[in-house]
């Protein structure tokens, strides 16, 4: 911008005078001043002075601007004009166009999702970028029922057909397991030449037809016979010329003078032949001091032996050990209580002692079962518990290897608990609710030692006092109510229970059953 000084000159004089004759090459302002001087008139004449020069440059900052912006102003100095610096917005070049091309994937192995196979970027920025996408071939899955052997438990991919034409889909053939094959367990006495101390699987027969059941033959050890033991006593009589004396020892007697020695020997023998149980469909019930075999399907019982452990005992917390086919439990008539083994004839062997039950209202061990690993878990009111090692050959066999106290915030009284196949790590109990509240299904977690309520049912049968419970290989829990004698089925998932059959009434009872036994069928 230019600034001027002005001087007054008469307008009439300027109009009447031709400026062309006054120094035509001189600046206009100088000629105007001369005209005004010649005519001695007054006029406004612009006189040049220092001003501002505008300098424009592109914006170089980081925050974008949308219009021209003055960034610096330098004032005039003397006759030098000032400078105004203005920055203008920078316009980005237009984005480069991208073209996407899709083609079927032809490589090997096949892909299951689209991938970028190539990106072509021409040197000329005005030409578009080309992106080539390879797409996966279609897949057709064919599912068929499995008919081979051995059985499968989950779907299996048997073949994948890849046509040469990439436009055609892949064909994947998947076979799925059919309905679970039934398993039949047959128990036979072992007839081999070697010695076994526990049941073993001798044969597994798997028919080629998937609809036919698998037969498992279990060989059980012959009854164990303990060799007769002898107890000998020898009596020696020694006579001398001066006196006589008699002494008893296991060897000969010696005196200062011996004339004759007479020896007599008496031998007594003791034979023990414990018989193992057969892992069959029956359950076993302890009631008072008697052992019964229970037909769960018919609801009938047969006496195995009465007067166990000398009679008048309180045997409870029993469980069936599938590792040796004996029943183990606790006799509460002793102080402290004793760990016992019961054989198939009802004969009892005392193995040792266990701690006294101190928690809860009932100071007896009356709830028990043996899990798949061979541990007897026992409790009273579901609070104090013990874990006893009953694994044949174990260095701690017959001893308590763990114990503790659990809380039961849900209340109620677990009169028996049972290991259910397929639910490892849990002992299920149909619990008698407090104050006539009916029944609940709970389980004790053998890892966390905590109780969990699965379902509440309300009143079901009798006084809801479920003193004996049983399970089988199909994962079903059966429980007998003491007062009505009814036997009910309880699904472990907590769905609705159902009455199975009528059974015997009992008291001071507990139940046990081989967890590998065949399913109960009516």
Image (spheres, rainbow, N blue to C red):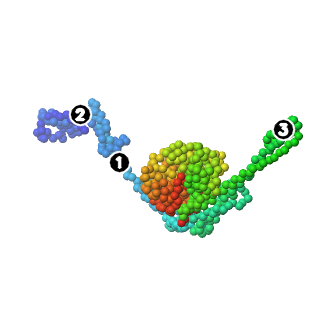
Query: What is the distance, in whole Å, between disc 2 and disc 1 at their CAs?
Result: 38 Å
Relative placement, left or right, of 170 versus 16 is right
* Above or below 62: residue 274: below
User: Do the CB atoms of the residues marked 2 and 1 lie less than 8 Å apart?
Assistant: no
* Image spot of residue 424 (x, y percent): 55, 53
Q: Residue at x 43, y 50 (%)?
A: 435
Task: Work out how far the residue at label 3 is from the one at label 2, CA to CA, in angstroms.
Answer: 167 Å
* Circle 3 or circle 2, nearest the eye: 3
Helix, strand or loop at label 2? It is strand
Which residue bears the numbered disc 2? 49
Counting from the top left corner in percent of width and height, residue 486 is at 49, 60
Which residue is painted at 44% across and 54% down in the image? 438
Q: Which sits earlier in the primary sequence, circle 3 or circle 1? A: 1
Decide which of tag 3 and tag 2 comes sooner along the chain.
2
Q: Position of residue 126 (x, y in %)?
A: 41, 54
Q: Depth check: 469 or 451 in front? A: 469
What is the distance, in whole Å, between disc 3 and disc 1 at their CAs? 140 Å
In the rendered image, the quadrant that contains the N terminus is top left
Q: Label 1's element?
A: loop
Query: Which residue carries the number 1 mark?
Result: 91
Q: Please state which of residues 447 and 102 is positioned toward the viewer in this rendering.
A: 447
Which SS class for mark 3? strand
Indicate which label's residue lies in the foreground, 2 or 1: 1
Question: Contact, CB < 8 Å: mark 3 with mark 1?
Answer: no
Classify the position of the C terminus by image quarter.
Answer: bottom right
Q: Nearer the viewer, mark 3 or mark 1?
A: 3
Residue 27, image quadrant: top left
What residue sits 57% from the left and 50% below the top? 314
């Amino acid at each position: 911008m230019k600034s001027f000084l002005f001087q007054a000159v008469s307008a009439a004089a300027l109009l009447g005078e031709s400026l062309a004759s006054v120094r035509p090459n001189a600046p206009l302002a100088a000629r105007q001043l001369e005209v005004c001087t010649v005519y001695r008139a007054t006029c406004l004449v612009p006189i040049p002075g220092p001003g501002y020069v505008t300098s424009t440059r592109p914006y170089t900052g980081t925050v974008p601007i949308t219009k021209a912006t003055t960034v610096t102003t330098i004032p005039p100095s003397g006759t030098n004009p000032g400078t105004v610096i203005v920055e203008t917005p920078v316009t980005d070049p237009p984005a480069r166009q991208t073209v996407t091309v899709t083609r079927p994937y032809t490589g090997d192995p096949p892909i299951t999702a689209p991938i970028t196979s190539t990106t072509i970027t021409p040197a000329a920025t005005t030409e578009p970028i080309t992106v080539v996408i390879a797409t996966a071939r279609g897949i057709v899955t064919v599912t068929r029922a499995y008919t081979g052997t051995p059985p499968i438990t989950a779907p299996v991919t048997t073949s994948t057909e890849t046509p040469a034409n990439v436009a055609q889909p892949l064909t994947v053939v998947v076979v799925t397991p059919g309905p679970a094959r039934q398993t039949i367990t047959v128990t036979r006495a072992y007839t081999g030449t070697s010695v076994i101390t526990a049941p073993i699987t001798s044969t597994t027969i798997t028919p080629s037809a998937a609809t036919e059941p698998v037969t498992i033959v279990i060989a059980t050890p012959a009854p164990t016979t303990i060799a007769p033991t002898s107890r000998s006593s020898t009596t020696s009589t020694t006579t001398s010329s001066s006196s006589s004396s008699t002494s008893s020892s296991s060897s000969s007697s010696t005196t200062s003078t011996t004339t004759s020695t007479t020896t007599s020997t008496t031998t007594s023998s003791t034979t023990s032949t414990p018989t193992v149980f057969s892992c069959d469909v029956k359950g076993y019930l302890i009631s008072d001091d008697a052992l019964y075999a229970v037909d769960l399907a018919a609801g009938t019982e047969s006496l195995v032996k009465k007067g166990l452990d000398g009679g008048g005992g309180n045997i409870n917390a029993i469980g069936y050990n599938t590792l040796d086919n004996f029943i183990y439990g606790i006799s509460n008539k002793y102080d402290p209580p004793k760990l016992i083994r019961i054989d198939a004839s009802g004969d009892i062997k005392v193995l040792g002692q266990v701690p006294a039950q101190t928690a809860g209202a009932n100071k007896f061990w009356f709830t028990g079962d043996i899990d798949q690993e061979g541990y007897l878990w026992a409790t009273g009111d579901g609070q104090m518990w013990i874990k006893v090692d009953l694994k044949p050959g174990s260095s701690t066999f017959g001893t308590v290897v763990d114990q503790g106290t659990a809380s039961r915030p849900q209340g109620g009284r677990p009169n028996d608990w049972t290991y259910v196949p397929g639910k490892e790590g849990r002992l299920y109990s149909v619990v008698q609710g407090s104050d006539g509240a009916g029944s609940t299904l709970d389980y004790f977690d053998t890892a966390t030692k905590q109780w969990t309520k699965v379902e509440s049912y309300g009143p079901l049968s009798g006084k809801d006092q479920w003193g004996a419970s049983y399970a089988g290989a199909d994962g079903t829990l059966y429980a007998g109510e003491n007062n009505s004698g009814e036997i009910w089925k309880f699904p472990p998932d907590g769905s609705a229970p159902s009455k199975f059959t009528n059974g015997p009434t009992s008291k001071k009872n507990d139940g046990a059953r081989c967890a590998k036994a065949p399913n109960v069928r009516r």
